[in-house]
């Protein structure tokens, strides 16, 4: 049944579910459309990672398993995720203790989920090209925030990209640190 609570030419509010009989936009196939190819999912994931001001959610756990989730901005540099945070933040401490994180980008119906390991922690004062790459992609430069900040360089091990249930099969576009090619 069409939504009768608003005129047809007005967009549906984001928090209101899409009626079952309303088609999904052509650029966002869903269960009634065709899933994206592996190549398209990989390209879309890379575009999201390298977008200006790429915001993400970073999940880590402390040494005793206490979970921590925080929104951060990332940079994509040399096939690595670069995060900037205070050296004393829970994220920096948890990565130092456990060495692993899960990073999520995008809305719930177009997600990129990344499992990654800490490769390096770099003080902002000696960040060189990593700091410059972060500042170029981001909307701020942590090198100007003082020596309390560090760059956390994460190496992705698994990358998954999907929009809806029809894209769950084949969602893995990187496995064991290598892009899937079929």
Image (cartoon, grey):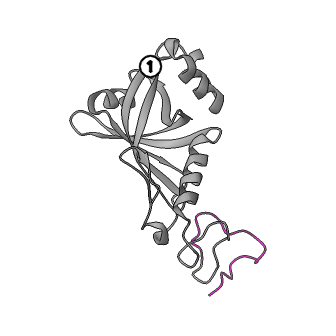
In the visual, does 97 lie left or right of 146?
left
Secondary element type, mark 1: strand
Report x, y in % for residue 130: 54, 23
Residue 89 visible (yes or no): no
- Front residue of 35/107: it is 35
Report x, y in % for residue 119: 38, 29
Residue at (41%, 21%) from the top-left corner? Answer: 87
In the visual, does 2 lie left or right of 95?
right
Report x, y in % for residue 98: 27, 33
In the visual, does 90 lie left or right of 82?
left
Which residue is farthest bottom?
A: 1
Report x, y in % for residue 35: 54, 70
Residue at (65%, 28%) from the top-left corner? Answer: 136
- Front residue of 135/17: it is 135
| Figure disc tally | 1
Residue at (44%, 27%) from the top-left corner? Answer: 152
Magenta residues span: 1-18
Look at the magenta stretch and give its main secondary structure.
loop
Q: Is residue 149 above or below residue 2?
A: above
In the visual, does 174 lie left or right of 97?
right
Which residue is farthest front?
A: 182
Residue at (57%, 20%) from the top-left corner? Answer: 129
């Amino acid at each position: 049944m069409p939504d009768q609570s608003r005129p047809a030419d007005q967009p549906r509010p984001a928090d209101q579910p899409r009626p079952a009989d309303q088609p999904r936009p052509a650029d966002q196939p869903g269960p009634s459309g065709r899933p994206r190819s592996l190549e398209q999912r990989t390209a879309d994931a890379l575009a999201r990672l390298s977008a200006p001001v790429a915001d993400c959610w970073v999940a880590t756990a402390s040494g005793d398993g206490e979970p921590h989730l925080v929104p951060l901005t990332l940079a994509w540099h040399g096939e690595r995720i670069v995060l900037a945070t205070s050296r004393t933040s829970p994220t920096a401490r948890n990565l130092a203790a456990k060495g692993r994180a899960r990073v999520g980008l995008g809305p719930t119906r177009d997600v990129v989920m990344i499992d990654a390991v800490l490769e390096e922690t770099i003080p902002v004062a000696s960040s060189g090209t990593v700091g410059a790459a972060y500042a170029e992609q981001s909307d701020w430069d942590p090198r100007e925030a003082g020596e309390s900040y560090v760059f956390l360089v994460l190496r992705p091990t698994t990358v998954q990209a999907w929009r809806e249930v029809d894209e769950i099969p084949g969602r893995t576009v990187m496995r064991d640190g290598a892009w899937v090619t079929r």
